[in-house]
Image: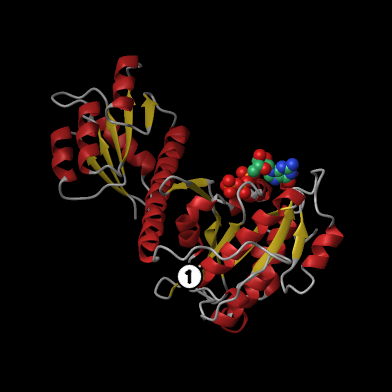
Amino acid sequence: MPRIMLVDDEPNVLRALERLLASPQLEIECFDDPEQALRRIHTATFDLVLSDFRMPRLDGVELLKQIRVMQPDAMRLILSAHTDLQAILSAINEAEIYRFIAKPWDPYDLKRTIDQALAHRAMLVENRRLAQQVRNQQEQIPPGDRAGGVGRGRFGAAGSGSDGVGMADYDEEQRRLTVKLVYYGPAQSGKTTNLMRLHDLLQPELKGEMMTLETRNDRTLFFDLLPLGFTAPSGLMIKFKLFTVPGQVQHDSTRKAVLSRADGVVFVADSQRSQSANNGESFDNLAANAARVGLDFEHLPLVVQFNKRDLADVLSEEEILDRWRQAPWPILFSVALVGDGVAETFHALLQPVYAALDRQFRLRADHGVDQAAFVAALGGMGAAA
Ligand SMILES: Nc1nc2c(ncn2[C@@H]2O[C@H](COP(=O)(O)OP(=O)(O)OP(=O)(O)O)[C@@H](O)[C@H]2O)c(=O)[nH]1
Ligand SMILES: [Mg+2]
């Protein structure tokens, strides 16, 4: 349960704030003496601190500055009747506060700001945990192993023998399943555009904020789909995370780390004739990296999207389908830039993903979730198309 600290030297103000914010989902501690508040910071962790600005002996900025050193993750908000620009600036610069709240406050705004601050903090902590996970995985993957040869034929994919499929992040104790889906492909093929358009298409309650994971010299974009989760009749909570990888050749270690434990992949190819070799190299790289992170590429839920159909010198649909005739994966065509084919591609991926999860976790038999319920939980994305 989030714990928040309220600090104001006027007991009346403190009581009013406490009454306003009181909720069974929050633990609130009140201090009318900032020095006592500071002592408490040594013994307990707070998610958020809301402090008055003008207080005798120790003002709000000074208090929050000291709290920032001891608990950098605590969201810091300042409350003040004085719309003193200098004070606000120092609060922002020195105490790195999240928000400034003017007295008298609007109760609705204040509550909303507190909720947003807590949600923001939860996301920052989660983002850091993921970045750390990616870093740890990068360190575990042995260097070397250059990607396979230049793409031939359809793209010239290589298989692997290891049985890594069904690596979904399953937390038995929490009864929670987190499904990871990754958009993979050559540089500039439209992976990020796909993710952004999909994000636009989703109903607000189905999505979290678009986030950037800063790893080494690159950025990996991701967002949570069903951030609140979808609860199966059995009580199992299912969540999704969607990622893009950076396509540039030099970011291979990030690609491997993001691909690790993936439950499904959309390979985004660039339809331009001039990009055939890049597509091929990237597809070989996917197959090679899947093997390196222990995924069974032969059984990995995968769909292939040929993007940028709007451009002039593209391979024709017939040529593409002919080259991929022997391949087991669905082929989709898209203009991600305007959103065409984005939902359809995602929907096409959900089918093999469901089948793989059902095999591993007996979604239908043990959890009462069939494919239709699975797709419906995701807003029926693409189902109507
Ligand atoms: N004409 C056209 N341009 C597109 C389409 N999809 C994406 N683009 C453009 O292609 C460029 C690259 O798109 P991104 O989505 O950033 O590509 P990416 O695959 O994420 O690239 P990296 O992150 O560098 O690997 C951008 O300028 C997009 O606007 C499309 O369907 N048609
Ligand atoms: Mg990108």
Front-most of 48 and 322?
Answer: 322
In percent of width and height, residue 208 lies at 54, 50
In percent of width and height, residue 322 lies at 83, 67
Report which quarter residue 367 is drawn in: bottom right
In percent of width and height, residue 20 lies at 38, 39
Q: How crowded is mark 1: few (under 14 residues within 10 Å), some or many (20 or more)?
A: some
Using the rendered image of the protein, determine whether residue 262 is visible from the camera's viewpoint: no
In percent of width and height, residue 88 lies at 33, 21
State whether residue 123 is above or below residue 379.
above
Report which quarter residue 381 is drawn in: bottom right
Q: Which image quarter is the N terminus in?
A: bottom left
Residue at 41% over, 58% down: 134
Front-most of 318 and 336?
Answer: 318
User: Is 107 on the left or on the right of 353, as rendered?
Assistant: left
Report which quarter residue 84 is drawn in: top left
State whether residue 278 is above or below residue 175.
above
Front-most of 244 and 356?
Answer: 244
State whether residue 380 is above or below residue 164.
above
The residue beneath circle 1 is: 292
Using the rendered image of the protein, determine whether residue 159 is visible from the camera's viewpoint: yes
